[in-house]
Amino acid sequence: MVTATALEKELLELAGSVPDPELPVLTLQELGVVRAARLHGSDTVEVDLTPTYTGCPAIEAMSVDIERVLRAHGMRQVTVRTVLAPAWTTDDISPEGRRKLREFGIAPPRVHSASGPVPLSLGPTRTHTHTTETQPVRCPHCGSPDTELLSRFSSTACKALRRCLACREPFDHFKEL
């Protein structure tokens, strides 16, 4: 017999296996947005989902996809709750998710080593090896740290558009939060 805890873990993994609608190379588990699955009875589950930012337009598509996957696994009633606390940060992206972003041609967000606010720049910036930044944004194509910001926004609000000054290729950078 499967225990409630084992079934909740399985349901959490199923919900986490759903591809992100904006970055389908990542699952919701790799993105770090599926937080919990709680079983109520034998066929009712409640899933906690944290958006990457308040007002994220993909949250509805994520919820519908989670509901579909869990219903296909025998859950009659599926509720997906949007949970804002604790807030999602880019540190929640798994190492596998970061690897997949890089392979897909998107510079993954830098991991910040200290807690607290992430420093942001409001103007155009260049990342060079001789700057004071401890972690430059590296080009996902050639690995060079010599990159420049072209636009603070790219195809989605969570990405910025950058260009490598070594290989001259443009690329998206998943911004740190």
Image (cartoon, helix red, strand yellow):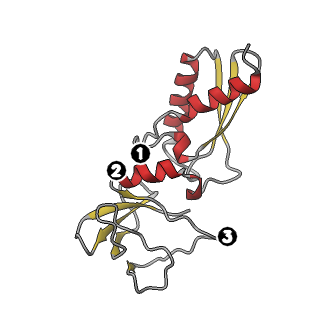
Asked whether the residues under the numbered discs 1 and 3 touch, taking CB atoms below 8 Å apart as contact, a structural biologist would say no
Q: Is residue 67 above or below residue 175?
A: above
For badge 3, the amino acid type reads Gly
Give the amino acid type for the residue marked by disc 2 in the picture.
Phe
- Residue labelled with disc 2: 104
Q: Amino acid at mark 1?
A: Leu
Q: CA distance from mark 2 to mark 1?
A: 10 Å
Residue 46 in the image, given as x and y percentages of width and height: 69, 29
Disc 1 and disc 3: Cα gap in Å?
A: 27 Å
- Residue displayed at 53% across by 40% down: 28
What residue sits 46% from the left and 40% below the top?
20
Secondary structure at numbered mark 2:
loop
Q: Quadrant of residue 123?
A: bottom left
**SS for callout 3:** loop
Q: Quadrant of residue 147?
A: bottom left
Q: Which residue is mark 3?
A: 116
Asked whether 104 or 35 is in front, the reply is 104
Question: Residue 40's mark?
Answer: none
Query: Are the residues flagged by discs 2 and 1 in contact, CB closer than 8 Å?
Result: yes
Question: Between 23 and 59, which is closer to the camera in this rendering?
Answer: 23
Disc 1 is placed on an element classified as loop
Residue at the farthest left position: 168
Residue labelled with disc 1? 23
In the rendering, at what x and y percent does residue 6 appear? Answer: 71, 25
The answer to which of marks 1 and 3 sits earlier in the sequence is: 1
- Front residue of this view, candidates 123 and 172: 172
Q: Position of residue 107 (x, y in %)?
A: 39, 60
